[in-house]
Image (spheres, rainbow, N blue to C red):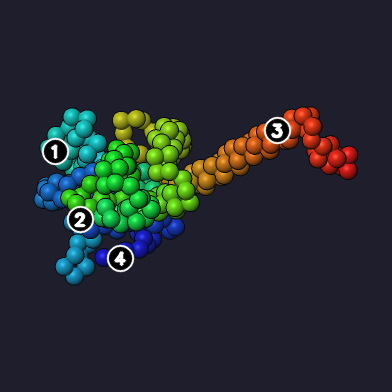
Amino acid sequence: MPRTSRPALASAASPVAQRNEYTVDELARVTDSTVRNIRAYQDRGLLAPPEKRGRVGVYDDTHASRLKLINHLLARGYTLANIQDLIKAIDEGHDLRSILGLENAIGSRWSHEHPKQYSLVELARMFGVKGTPAALTKTVSKAIELGLLERDGLSFVARSPATLNAGATMAQAGIPLSDLLDAVNVSRPHFNAIAKALVDLVVRQLDRYDADALPPPADVPALVDAVWRVRPLGMVLVESEMNRALEEASGDYLGDRVAAIMGKLERKDAGGGGSVNVSKKKR
């Protein structure tokens, strides 16, 4: 079912905020949960029911951020009963829509991409792989280890089809798949560090409040708006800095390559050539 992101409710975020929409299977995938758990959380009142469109239930980023919160608390040792009490206390002590807006602004996905499924044959065609099935399987396994692909029965799912398409274009241009995957593996810790720095910028909006307390209800709408405004600016910063770094790296490489060529020509000239000295005299 094709879906497009659309403006979130004004009460939950700024007017420019966009939200993702998911089927229950997609929601389970993007939150590292299961359909069974989603149903169970709904039955216990931990998760709001989806919007019904005909016979299909449609979830959005408020559900995704709530699921991530539940999973995080479970990982820290809280029981479902503890979490249920906590959510009930929040709901009783604060404006529910404002709290959900804050939860959504901080915890929702930064990407509007939807996962896409591929067969092994489609992947081989995309990346122009012409090796043995064993070689292709080895490459796919490495992509799975890096989280670029997930196995789904006999098929594979990419959480970011755009990333997969970019890699396929580079592979078709002649860059070996193994080199592409190695580049992802090497660069990922640096991206993780960048992401942490940007998330710190966003959540620092909460530092003026006690660490173990929610902001006062009256402050939440302005805080939600501020967080939504900071998020896209963070992405602009990443793109700008990445462009600068790529230009510098490309320039350094080009300069080194030209210098090496000129050095070779000069050595050739010193050994009996003459073309380089002639051109130098003309300049």
Q: Mark 4 points at which residue?
A: 2
Determine if residue 102 is in view.
no
Mark 3, other Cα within 10 Å: few <14 / some 14–19 / many ≥20: few
Which comes sooner in the sequence, label 3 or label 4?
4
Secondary element at tag 2: helix
Mark 3 touches mark 4? (CB < 8 Å): no
Mark 1, other Cα within 10 Å: few <14 / some 14–19 / many ≥20: some
Mark 4, other Cα within 10 Å: few <14 / some 14–19 / many ≥20: few
Q: How far apart are marks 1 and 2 (CA)?
A: 20 Å
Which comes sooner in the sequence, label 4 or label 1?
4
The nearer-to-camera label among 2 and 4 is: 4
Amino acid bearing label 2:
Val
Q: Which mark is residue 185?
A: none
Q: In this view, does 227 lie above or below 274?
A: below
Secondary element at tag 1: helix
Q: Name the residue under label 3.
A: 264
